[in-house]
Image: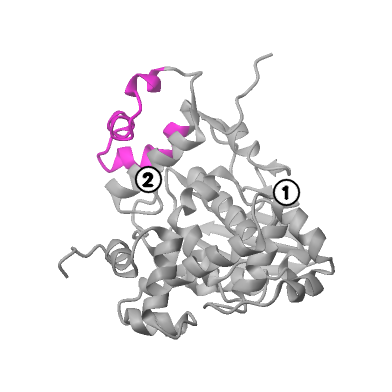
Amino acid sequence: MSVRPANTLSIMYVQRLLAGAARRGVPPEELFERSGLDPARLGDPDGRIEGGEVIRLVQEVMRRTQDEFIGLASDARSKPGTFSMMAHAVINCPNLAQAIRRSLDFYGLFETPTVASMEVADNEGRVTLSLRQDTPFADTILEVMVFVSVRFWSWLVGRRLDPLVIEFAGDPPPRAAEFQQLFRCPVNYGMETNVIRFPAAWLTLPLAQTPLSLSRFLKDSLALIIGGRAKPVGLADQVRNMLGKEAYGNSFPELSDICRQLNMTQQTLRRRLKDEGTSYQVIKDQMREDAARFYLAKPALSIDEIALMMGFSEASAFHRAFKKWTGMTPAACRRQLLGTPEND
């Protein structure tokens, strides 16, 4: 019996994902070549594509089609940056219920290929999806929407979420088993509706993420979603989340305060953070750097203003600290973030 390599998709399933781009005049062979992959691999019906290669292909499709739905919808397009806007709209929600509802309301403002709604009944949450009109890529569109939704929710709460069941109204599409293997729950076809059914308790989960962790996430969101790295939050992440909800500058709680909130001794906290390859000081420095980059990406703020917001009494002290964290000056980092030339 052959064993399917971990974190791979079959060539045939990947071709399903690329079908929308092909309809818009971008053939799979060109996408492979532009992504640094050998187009000859398309001729191998038993071939497989690694996760990183899938990410490069999807990024190339989005670039060529200027569509976050990767060209699958015939009469609708989601411009690059729409997902980012949605994520910013939900990041300050207190729990997953409000985050899901707000994301559904957000996409309801656009002519997307799907219509979604949420209800709670019999201790279950249910997000139901329907298509605005018939489309030849209906099954792929629905699969992509379900996959991205569950992975994004998992990232928001900092733990892997496994639905009770995923149901589709249509017949199983080609290579349906590929999609089923992405989840640790039943995936049923030929049902009455397209629905993600999950424990209602999910909806009370608080968001583990903050605007700062969102800024990191959005730099590599496609890889994080496709790669499925929404794992349970480790101790270092718990500490980051505690700090991120309180501090955006240079002032942080004492280690003893953090220990009291976590109900553990300082020695235990230091040891467990060391086991995760970090320390409280490293976490604070990373948080300071993230906060500084967050503010530097806002052109309306001067560097002197950012220094004060970061808790520095003098801009020169901020410059020294930032260069220590990043190896570059705040001005150089701002030019990099905003894509402005050096003489501006």
* Span shown in magenta: 14-43
Q: Residue at x 62, y 60 (%)?
A: 153
- As drawn, which residue projects farthest toward the left? 343
Say if residue 162 shows up in the picture. no
- Residue type, label 2: Gln
Q: Position of residue 104 (x, y in %)?
A: 54, 69
Q: Position of residue 21 (x, y in %)?
A: 33, 41
Q: Relative to the observer, which residue lies in front, 243 or 274? A: 274
Instruction: Looking at the image, tell me whether mark 2 or mark 1 is earlier in sequence order.
Output: 2
Q: Residues within 10 Å of mark 1 (few under 14, many from 20)?
A: few
Is residue 40 located in the magenta-colored stretch of the structure?
yes
Q: Residues within 10 Å of mark 2 (few under 14, many from 20)?
A: some
Q: Secondary structure at mark 1?
A: helix
- As drawn, which residue projects farthest toward the top? 1
Q: Are marks 2 and 1 in contact (CB under 8 Å)?
A: no
**Label 2: which residue?**
59
Q: Residue at x 17, y 70 (%)?
A: 344
